[in-house]
Image (tube, rainbow, N blue to C red):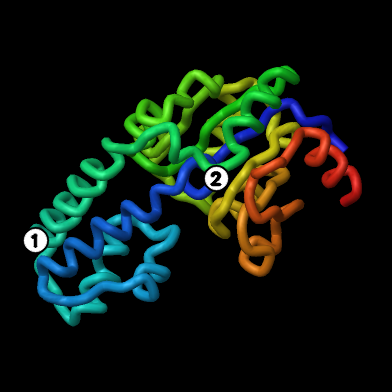
Amino acid sequence: MSSIKGCIFDLDGVVVDTAKYHYQAWKRLANELGFEFDESHNERLKGVSRMRSLEILLEVGGLSFPQEKMEQLAARKNEWYVEYISRMTPNEILPGSKELLEELRAKGIKLALGSASKNTPLIMDRIGLKDHFDAIIDGNIISIAKPAPDIFLAASKAIGVEPPCCIVFEDAEAGVEAAINAGMRVVGIGNPQVLKRANLVVPNLKNFTFQYLVNSLSEK
């Protein structure tokens, strides 16, 4: 088994949870358009692009608009989302994430963030973790979405670690697929039924250690 020399972390659902802010912004847009948008509807938006999310939201409301209006609505939603995440604090780092990053760094493991979000720089500034990573690859650098492997391949290149020696931490099925497509091993965070193709699945990173990672992967 290739040794672990680099770890690549997805941002949302792994390091922080910004999904609630996306939901609040979409719900606010739906209310402005005159219909209700609840958490069961929101499940359909997970891992989906902003414009496709808007299409789904409008399907829920039974509405349709020309492309120009759609772009205005998507931009308004994003303005609200940015307004919400601009108030984030380091208290919103998910349990265990910072501790694991610090342990990995102490062991000489190269660290990268690989997120499709174009708002990654703002979020990283707000939570104060930017200096914990050797490289940050986000939607401003790579526009091809997961499950394409582009984000993770760019991250491995940026930290100078070959894909077989990289471990990806992901909470989404498309992200797990992207890691596999990149030739990397992957730790899924969340539901084992959804993330079944991951090499290892844990509910969260609380009390997760490098030794546990090594032991778990060597048993596979």
Give the residue pinned by disc 1: 69
Q: Image point 34% across, 37% down: which residue? A: 88
The amino acid type, in three-letter code, at marker 1 is Lys
Q: Which of 184/112 is in front?
A: 112
The amino acid type, in three-letter code, at marker 2 is Val
Image mark count: 2
Task: Indicate the position of residue 149 as horizontal and vertical percent values.
Answer: 56, 45
Q: In which quadrant is the N terminus drawn?
A: top right
Which residue in the rendered view is the most extreme toward the bottom? 62
Which residue in the rendered view is the most extreme toward the front? 91
Task: Indicate the position of residue 187 as horizontal and vertical percent values.
Answer: 69, 48
Q: Residue 40, relative to residue 176: is it above or below?
A: below
Q: Image point 54% across, 23% down: which residue? A: 133
* Rendering quarter of residue 20: bottom left
Give the residue pinned by disc 2: 14
Name the N-terminal-most of marks 2 and 1: 2
In the image, is 70 to the left or to the right of 130?
left
Q: Which of 127/152 is in front?
A: 127
The answer to whether marks 2 and 1 mark residues whose Cβ atoms lie closer than 8 Å is no
